[in-house]
Image: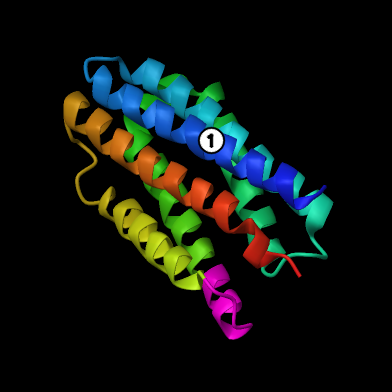
């Protein structure tokens, strides 16, 4: 897989995540069941993109193992979300928090690898990783939030995750040897 395909896949995943995030803002009265399906599908696509990119370019990227781990955990969480919608509706803040916390931490650790190798742009991934981890962790403090608050919070978090995926796509050339 060449750089262009990887960049396009990350950018498409980011756009999809941002679109779902905007939909959460546009329709705050949407049911949590619909939100869980949209979240599950967006997460499934995002995780599959990470796995495909790892499979094609693991020897050419710094921190490729983190992409694989992030992709696998994202796919597993998405399958769980899509298969258990009633449970997901009750635990959505925890599931979303776990996903964002792990994605943020893996992005943060990966950015330090890039910094160690003198790559430019590593600071942006550090900042996005910290932001995702902080938002993911904060979802554990008030899991009984109302549906409107949950959809707005979910929309914001998905937009952040989408921005992180787009940043990966835009900065991909800097990650490759």
- Left/right placement of residue 31 relative to residue 11 reads left
Can you say whether 149 is above or below 85 in the image? below
Q: Residues within 10 Å of mark 1 (few under 14, many from 20)?
A: many
Percent x, y for residue 15? 49, 34
Percent x, y for residue 8? 65, 40
Colour mapping: rainbow
Please tell me whether the stretch drawn in magenta is mainly helix, strand or loop.
helix
Percent x, y for residue 135? 30, 53
- Magenta residues span 109-120
Residue 76 visible in the snapshot: no
Can you say whether 125 is above or below 38 in the image? below
Residue depicted at 64% across the width and 47% down the height = 71
Residue at label 1?
A: 43
Residue depicted at 37% across the width and 40% down the height = 159
- Left/right placement of residue 124 relative to residue 74 reads left
Can you say whether 110 is above or below 162 in the image? below
Which of the 4 image quadrants contains residue 10? Answer: top right
Residue depicted at 54% across the width and 74% down the height = 120
Percent x, y for residue 148? 18, 25
Residue 177 visible in the snapshot: yes
Q: Is residue 66 magenta?
A: no
Which of the 4 image quadrants contains residue 74? Answer: top right
Which quadrant: the C terminus? Answer: bottom right
Q: Is residue 113 magenta?
A: yes
């Amino acid at each position: 897989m060449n750089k262009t395909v990887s960049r396009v896949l990350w950018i498409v995943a980011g756009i999809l995540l941002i679109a779902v995030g905007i939909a959460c803002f546009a329709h705050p009265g949407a049911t949590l069941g619909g939100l869980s399906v949209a979240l599950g599908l967006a997460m499934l696509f995002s995780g599959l993109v990470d796995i495909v990119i790892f499979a094609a370019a693991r020897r050419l990227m710094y921190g490729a193992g983190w992409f694989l781990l992030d992709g696998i955990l994202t796919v597993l969480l998405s399958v769980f979300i899509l298969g258990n919608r009633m449970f997901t509706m009750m635990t959505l803040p925890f599931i979303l928090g776990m996903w964002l916390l792990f994605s943020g931490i893996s992005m943060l650790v990966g950015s330090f690898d890039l910094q160690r190798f003198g790559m430019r742009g590593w600071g942006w991934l550090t900042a996005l990783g910290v932001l995702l981890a902080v938002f993911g962790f904060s979802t554990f403090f008030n899991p009984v939030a109302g549906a409107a608050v949950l959809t707005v919070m979910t929309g914001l978090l998905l937009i952040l995750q989408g921005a992180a995926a787009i940043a990966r796509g835009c900065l991909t050339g800097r990650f490759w040897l």
